[in-house]
Image: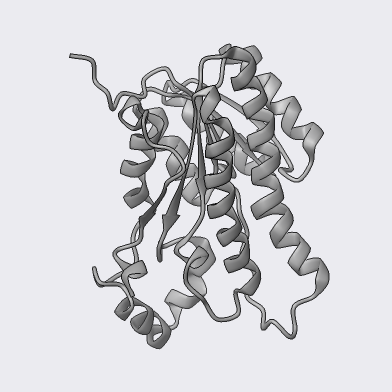
Amino acid sequence: MVDMFSIKDKVIIVTGSGKGIGYVYAKGLAEKGAKIAICDINQENLNKVEQEFKGAGYQVVSQKVDITNQSEIENFVKEVINNFGKIDVLINNAGVLLRRLPEEMLENEWDFIMDINVKGTFLFSQAVGKEMIKADCGGKIINISSQAGVRAADRRLGYCTSKAAIIHFTRTLANEWGKHKINVNAIGPGYIKTDMNTDLRADPVRYAKMKQEVPLGDFGEPEDILGTIFYLCSGASDYVTGQIIFVDGGITTQ
């Protein structure tokens, strides 16, 4: 019987994969036999990951990309196709967070969040989607939203707004591209231990309070998202599109 959860030899792009949770996604997928294309704004981080992956025998292509720059995205997409011949999956992981009081947020800070979290997701989806449509073989796009896309959070107006936008972007694009057999879904992580919240976890009082919000009792690890990533990349999710899967320890039940 064919393993419907297999991702072996699938060509998968992971944006923002030079470090952090994007790196965890890319490594987990590579370990399962996928061909990985990684991009990041930080060349040094990319070099380290590429060297590690090649040393482990993984098939990998890397390139520095500013995800707000359409030409850089398109050049990277061409490079991936030149190396691997196709693109099966795009994971729009790259994102930023700034904590500001709404009355103190600067216009350029708002634009910075929206450009990376929303515009970057659109530009990458468009560039990859065009190639998927041209190839006429379908494909999968996985966007990374957040529990903050449906829950308010203090000093995170821009971030929450951007992640809410990703949710409706996902549903609308799924509706538009279903005719091309392109599945578009999103993952909504909850409180995950990443660099974005290191400062919050370093405050024992704040950390304890935040853990109390989670029915499962603690922040998750980046690896806790991998099972859902594998599912959405594989044939097991071929009839799933326009969905937002929250991997959040139950926090969105609050």
Q: Quadrant of residue 203?
A: bottom left
| Quarter containing the C terminus | bottom left
Q: Residue 38: give x, y in percent of width and height.
A: 58, 33
Of the 4 image quadrants, the one containing the N terminus is top left
Identified at 82% across, 71% down, the residue is 107
- From where the camera sits, is residue 102 visible? yes
Residue at 36% x, 31% y is 239
Farthest-out residue, left: 1
* 227 sits left or right of 191 in the view: left
Q: So how many labels did they put on this image?
A: 0
Q: Residue at x 50, y 25 (%)?
A: 139
- Percent position of residue 104, x then y: 75, 84
**Residue placed farthest to the bottom in the image?**
205
Looking at the image, residue 60 sits to the left or right of residue 24; the answer is right
Image height check: is 162 above or below 77? Answer: below
Q: Is residue 224 above or below residue 30?
A: below
- Residue 37: x percent and y percent? 56, 28
Q: Is residue 60 left or right of residue 204?
A: right
Give the residue displayed 54% in from the left and 30% down from the top: 51
- The x, y position of residue 236, in whole percent, is 30, 29
